[in-house]
Structure formats: C-alpha cells, structure tokens
Amino acid sequence: MTDTRTAPRADTARAGAVVLTDVVKRYGRGPGAVTALDGVSLSVEPGSFTCLLGASGCGKSTLLSLVAGLDDISGGAIEHVDQPVAMMFQESALFPWLTVLGNVEIALRVRGVGRAERRRRALELLETVRLSGFAHKRPHELSGGMRQRVALARALAQDASVLLMDEPFGALDAMTRDLLHDELERIWREQRLTVLFVTHNVREAVRLGDRVVLLSSRPGRVLNVYDVDLDRPRRIDSAPVATLAADITDALRAEVGRHAG
Amino acid sequence: MTDLKAATARPVVVPPVDDEELAAGRASRPRGRRRLGPGRPIRLGFLIGPLLLLGVWIWGSAAGWIDPRVLTAPWTVAATAWDLWESGRLGPDLLVSARRFALGLAFGVAAGLVLALVSGLSRWGEAIVDGPVQIKRSIPNLALLPLLLLWFGIDERMKIITIALGVLIPIYIHTHNGLRSIDGRYAELAETLRLRPAAFVGRVVLPGALPGFLLGMRFAVTSSWLSLVVVEQVNATSGIGYMMLLAGTYGQTDVIIVGLVLYALLGLASDSIVRLVQRRALSWRRTLED
C-alpha cells in the first residue's frame, strides 16, 4: 500500500464512521414476509470508500436507506459515530422548479445558513463540481452527468462526513461516468469523506473502493469483502482493476447462477 | 523534441466539464423541433378563434343573413356600447361587476387553497374536508341561492360569498390532485435533506402542486364570471347583469348583446392572463406545451 490516503485518519475533523451489527430487514408479516437483509455486519472506517456490490434485488439499496434513516430496521443495530449523513440517488433527484443554485442552497437553508453565506457557499460548491457557469440553469437544461454533479454539490452542502450514494452514476454513459469517478475521487480525498457507494457495476466498485463488499441475493448477506490495494488515482480500464474485477465477477456470477438455477 | 518538451512543461490543469458531456446534454444544443406534437407556438394564437367568430358575425350581418331582430349587428352593438359609456351608464356597472368578480375570486381561491392543503397534507384533514367539498360540488349555485339570500341578505356580501363558493371548488379539486400527484421521490429527497414541515410545504408541496393549482385557476376565473351573471340577474341593482336584465324588460337586444360581449371579453382576457402566468411559472416543465 503505497497510497498515502490509507493512513489512519482519526485526527481529521470530518472523519465519521458507520457500524452495522447483524442488521435484519423484513417487509411484511407472517408467512408472506420477505427478508431483504439477513444479518449484515459491516464496519465502515472513517475516511474510507466502501462499495456495496450485488445483483439487483440483493437489498443493497435497502441497506443504504436504513443507514440514511429513511426506513426502520427489523433487527440488529446501526451505529453512527457522526450523525449527519448525506444521500445521493441514481435518478438525479433535483427539484425541477429550482435553479441549479437553488437546489444546492436548499441544503444550506435547512442548516440555517444565512442568505449571503448561502449564496457564497453554494457557488463555491458548484465550482468544486465544475459547474460554475450553470448556477442559474434549470435541471431540465442540463445533461445527465451535469445533473449528477449538481446532486453531488448538494450532498456536499449538507456538510455531512458520511456520503451515501445509491448507484449515482448508473444512468450515465461510460465516458461521463469515467469523468465523474475522477471528480468523486478528488472530492472524497479533498474533503476527507466517508463514502458508502452502492453499485451493480463490478469495475466501478473496484475503480473507486478501498473495499468492495459483495452481497448475496434474497436474503442479502455479506458474501465476501475484498480489499482493493491498488494505487490511486486508478483507471477503470487498467489491467489490475480488470483482474480484480474479473475475480469478483466470477463470485457474483456464481451467486446469481445459484438463484437462477 | 522541443515540441515534446513544451507539451510536458505545460502545467497540468484539470479540464472543466468535458465537451463530450456538454454535447451529450441539452445545454449546448438548440432546442430541436419535435416532428410529432402540436408544433410551433403561434403568436397571439388564442385570438384567432374568437376573431373568426367575430368575422362570421360581421359578414353574416353585412350580407343580411342575420336578422338584426335575432342578433344585433356588431356595429350597432359597438355604437350602443359607446353610447352607454358616453352617458356614464356602462362605466359604473362595469366597475361594480369587476369588483365582485375580483373579491369573489380572491376569497374563493384563498379558501380553496387552504382546504386543499389541509386535505392534501393530512389524512384527518382529508376525512373532514373532502366529503363536504364533494357535496358542495354536486349542488348548483343556483339551487343554493335562495338559502344564501336568507342567510346573507341581498347585499354585496351574499354576492361575493356565492361567487367564492363557485371558485373554491375547482381550486380545491385541482390543487388537491396536483399535490397528491407530486412524485414520491421529492418527498424522499426532502427527508434526506431533513427539511422541516414548513420548508417542505413552501419548497416542495406548493411548487409541486402549482401545475394543478393553475389549471384550477383557469376553471376558477371562468366560474367567477359565470357566478357573477347569476347573482347579478337574480337580485341586484347594479352591475352588467342588472343592466342586461333591465334591457331585457325593455326589449333592448343591443344592450343585452353588449353585456354578453363584455362577459365574453372579460372571460377570455382573464383566462389568457392565467395561461400566460402558467407558461411563465411552469417553464421548468418539459411538455408538449413549449
């Protein structure tokens, strides 16, 4: 591990962590009940980048909304060392009636930031995601990639140390996604965030994560955890990424095959 | 060799948003015309239909196909309107009618909006409010008029309340529907942003329900004029409706037509204003409208 980023970050101001212990999530009651998650335990290090990987329907998005507190757990425990978490969805969940600036400012307004400071901070964040010239556009005037940049800026505006991302780049073309991987990596390092990133794209998980957590399907359990000891910045098309991705893909295929058969 | 050196010496700058991304998006692309859909907007297009109608009226009267006893010729109506205005009879009546229209509309919209919010945001509110509004909806104002006369007398109050009762219904129905059709994702997003209830209503619910509200508003302005005709013809001593009623007893067809034309013009004008506001306020939507 030659990467400086893997050094302990306990001294940093914005470090945060999430610890999941035997988390169970069931929907419904009685014989018709569906167990989405069955005893998921996971400890997310402060400042780390963790990717949750699994086939569709494995409950990875469910897990994220449980961590975000959008839904109640049926068993186990979720501990936040540092409470506020920010969330980013796949479909750019921007308010279409607000401008780009307004969409970022709303997160600051909630935190009681004053008008002038709000404007200054929002413009600064738009610069961080390289959208300076688009402050007064409406979401429908932007491309998919740009909309996700706005969503990222807003998530950053929440000033949370933990960033939860639910397939944020799933709907983008490969080129745009590649570009946003670079941006996200840069911002994650600069802002010393803890990222929990859900995806079904194996290469994306290896490209971004310090760790890749492979989940099984129906019910969701932790199948395997891969430490990604590759130097950063990485490229999604580099040989080491491809090699590890191939290993994980094999495990994932076996898992999906087990259910299909 | 020098080229290479120049290239490597260049400071590394992180590129701004890539061209590919811009090209892929709508930002740099002039809005293309759809092949399907209604086509380009027509400037002042909303006037074409009414002007055609006017044309038929003028042509028919000039050619003698329309008997002036059945329908007064447009120029006679224009002359009568001018006479009425000159003699100072039209102005005050118009003003009284406009005031009733505006007050009835204002109170009706306010009440409809409050009821729609109460019923839209709370199940208990809906349980209490929705039924009575649906009941009111199935009772025509004309049938309520005798009761309203008994309760509120024959003065302005009764007229404004009657108009407001008519306006309230479409505002309620369409705002409530618009509010409940707001995409669930926006509520989820508001939750992750930890918006407080007041901010949720102000930033999400109201703008989200705006398309519904404005549609309700189009029905409301028309309903306001319609109720006005009713209250001014049943019991009034002023207003355009009263003027027409009086003209009816003296057989002055031209004055009646002046009143009808006025109602038509005011109705068309107020609807156009709402549609203009609609286009401006809902520019964030991508629909077949634009």
Image (spheres, rainbow, N blue to C red):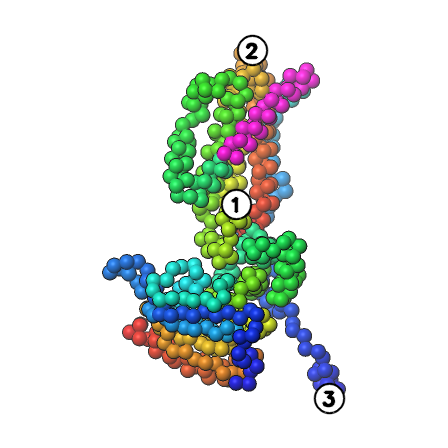
- Which residue is depicted at the point 67% across and 19% down? B85
* Depth order, front residue of B222/B137: B137
Which chain is mark 1 on?
B
- Which residue is depicted at the point 46% across and 73% down? A44
- Which residue is depicted at the point 60% across and 22% down? B96
The residue labelled by disc 1 is: B206
Q: Nearer the viewer, mark 1 or mark 3?
A: 1
Residue A202 occupies quadrant: bottom left
Q: Nearer the viewer, mark 3 or mark 2?
A: 3
Which chain is mark 2 on?
B
Residue numbers of the magenta segment: B83-111
Query: Viewed as shown, does residue A169 lie left or right of B135?
Result: right
Residue farthest left in this picture:
A31
Which chain is mark 3 on?
B
Query: Viewed as shown, does residue A85 lie left or right of A113?
Result: left
**Do the numbered discs 1 and 3 sit on residues whose CB atoms are within 8 Å?**
no
Looking at the rendered structure, the secondary structure element under dot 2 is loop
The residue labelled by disc 2 is: B250
Q: Is residue B60 above or below residue A171?
A: above
The residue labelled by disc 3 is: B1
Query: Viewed as shown, does residue A124 lie left or right of A18?
Result: right
Q: Position of residue B159 (x, y in %)?
A: 52, 22
* Depth order, front residue of B125/B103: B125
Considering the whole magenta stretch, tell me its main secondary structure. helix
